[in-house]
Image: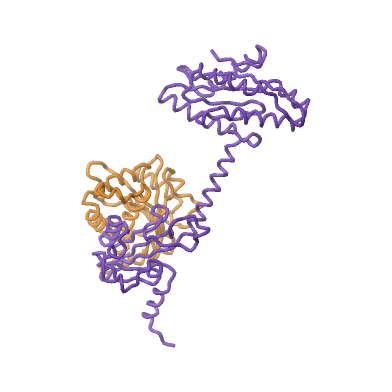
Chain colours: A orange, B purple
Amino acid sequence: MSEPALNEDQRDALQEVANLAMGQAATRLAQLLDSFIELSVPRVQVVAASDAAQALRDMTGIQESVSAVRQSFRSDIKGEALVICRSGGIEQLCSLVNDPYPSSTYEKVSQQELIFDVANVLTGACVSCILDQLGRTPVFSPPGLLGEAMSLDDVFQPGALAWQAALLVEVNFALEDESFRAHLVMLMPEESIRHMNHALDALLTSL
Amino acid sequence: MNVPAASLSDLVVERVGFGIFVLDREMNVLMWNRFMQDHSGLSAEQVVGKSIFTSCPELPRVWLTRKLESVFQLGSFAFSSWEQRPYLFKFDHDRPITGGVDYMQQDCTFMPLTRDREVVAVCVTISDVTHVSIVQREREEAVAKLQEYADRDGLTGIANRRYFEARLRDEYARWQRYGGDMSVLLFDLDHFKKINDQFGHVVGDTVLREMAQRVAQVVRVQDTFGRFGGEEFALLLPCTTLDEAMLVAEKIRHTIGDTPVDVQSVRVPVTASVGGAAARVGVPNYDVLINEADAALYSAKRQGRNRSVAFI
């Protein structure tokens, strides 16, 4: 793994933070979505942004095209969060999420609005909870669609990436009868990784 | 000068160029800034302390309630973009003449206001993005126009070969999947090289334009008529048997040949040869279909021109 990496203690601490955060996020999402979403224990990995596509492919086994929604978050730890899933996967999730609201068909919600809503809820819950564990309250930008049918390599174009490091957080969202997998990726500049390292150290010494 | 920062914040919120208001979990308005007042015509006094739906009954109730609830429950931001939902409030915008949109286009942000990790209220901001939406619409129109030009033949204005082949490929794929009928006609102006040599390229070009125009007027909307190159044209006929296609071929041949073209005070007689072929089981791809129509066209030429021949 290339720089900037976490030392072993920091990595363990980050895994623990992510575990706690996902527990929190799952509880909140369950309340919001009528308790039919379950979040798995996340797998956490820090890689160079240029290796992110390959690392994510190794983690998830995704070869086909994906949909990706991006959103930036900001505190002293800042960066971009991507929600990535197989093309069509978000629509599948949307159809389930939309289900409790058939009565409001007169207030029409477009497919794209739903995609943004769902991605925003996932990002918001997961990123907020992770940063909350580190004592930060992030501010979020509106979500934007990177693409609905793109290859993982196009998501992480080395030339277009401003961030050097990617924190890969693989989260599985399990639905009632179908299994839907989405992957959350946090891209951060070196500066933010450093802030995160300090925050993790502070967390470790406070234990 | 010693103005407390808190009161400065109030002044900023009052004067800032976007809408700011705050709602509690029961959808009661707790704050309503000047922008909201100016655009809604409702003062803070009229609105604060009441449900927002009392003051603004036209708001999408289910949608807004759900949005607010997600912020209260998750403690994270929520958003709404003009691209999916053009506006939340029916506000006037400041481009009534040049705008071309009905209401102010709005981006909305729903921010959790937290105290001790508890969301106590939600602040909603409304940004006027009318100008962004207008610029974007103009760009989309420009792109559509460019796309249109990219699909057209410069001289005749009908479909170019690239577009024709793309349509043929799609139509062929549809036929392979759903069956039915589809035919293709290829036709060629007879002895066109002689027209060019004898009257010059300007006359030649005029003949091409005139013929393209005449034929374009007799084809159906669902057909695709394109210039295949030089003096060769192609017509894609969906849901058409070979027999029907050959009737069309004769119609085209008469459209072209019955009246000579008058150009620069010379009368240029023009005739055409037509070859037709239809998709059927055993034709592996659309290239073969084109080759068969081409073979029929060649046969029409060899039999003496100014005639239609079907590939059998």
Q: Specify the quadrant that holds the N terminus of chain B.
A: bottom left
> Which image quadrant for residue B180?
top left
Among all residues in the image, which is located at the extreme bottom? B1
> Which image quadrant for residue B114?
bottom left
Q: Is residue B212 left or right of residue B203?
A: left
Q: Nearer the viewer, residue B117 or B289?
A: B289
Residue A127: percent from left, percent from top? 33, 59
Q: Nearer the viewer, residue A77 or A203?
A: A77
Q: Is residue A11 visible?
A: no
Classify B93 as above or below B49. Answer: above
Point 54% across, 18% down: residue: B247
Point 44% across, 28% down: residue: B174
Among all residues in the image, which is located at the extreme right? B198
Residue A134: percent from left, percent from top? 31, 65
**Number of callouts:** 0
Q: Is residue A29 left or right of residue B43?
A: left
Classify B312 as above or below A160. Answer: above
Classify B281 as above or below A197. Answer: above
Residue A205: percent from left, percent from top? 28, 68
Residue B36: percent from left, percent from top? 38, 68
Q: Is residue B9 visible?
A: yes
